[in-house]
Image (spheres, rainbow, N blue to C red):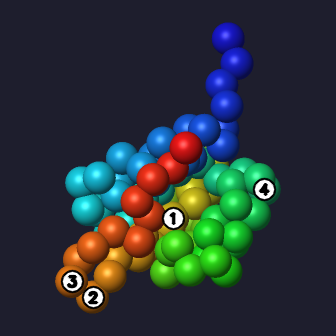
């Protein structure tokens, strides 16, 4: 069985925006890092960074989601 890491990333973001979470974390990869940079450059997220949780063997990608001044969602649809 194969998984699609980009679809998984977008699903994590979509679900986090739906419940208005300020931040979402996922396993890190070069492709996800690049996609997060594009989302930041285009103004859909505040920022992203790589984190190494204590005791964890793999790094995580943490994305700070962006909302408007009245809490409205900046990311409305992901298709």
Badges 4 and 3: C-beta atoms under 8 Å apart? no
Kindly report which numbered mark, 3 or 1, lies closer to the viewer in this rendering.
Answer: 3
Front-most of residues 6 and 75: 75
Tell which residue pokes out farthest to the bottom in this image.
Answer: 69
Residue 1 drawn above or below residue 13 = above
> Dot 4, how many residues are within 10 Å of its Cα: few (below 14), some (14-19), or many (20+)?
few
> Picture quarter containing residue 60?
bottom right
Residue plotted at (51% across, 50% down): 78
Residue located beneath label 4 in the image = 30
Q: Earlier in the sequence, mark 2 or mark 4?
A: 4
Kindly report which numbered mark, 1 or 2, lies closer to the viewer in this rendering.
Answer: 2
* Quadrant (top left, top right, bottom left, bottom right) of the N terminus: top right
Give how far across and how far down residue 5 sits, in percent.
Answer: 66, 38
In the image: residue 71, left or right of residue 2: left
Kindly report which numbered mark, 2 or 4, lies closer to the viewer in this rendering.
Answer: 2
- What element does badge 3 sit on? loop
């Amino acid at each position: 069985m194969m998984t699609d890491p980009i679809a998984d990333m977008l699903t994590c973001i979509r679900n986090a925006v739906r419940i208005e979470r300020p931040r979402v974390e996922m396993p890190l990869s070069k492709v996800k890092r690049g996609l997060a940079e594009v989302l930041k450059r285009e103004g859909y997220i505040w920022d992203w960074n790589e984190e190494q949780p204590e005791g964890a063997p793999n790094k995580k990608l943490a994305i700070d989601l962006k909302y408007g001044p009245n809490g409205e969602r900046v990311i409305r649809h992901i298709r």
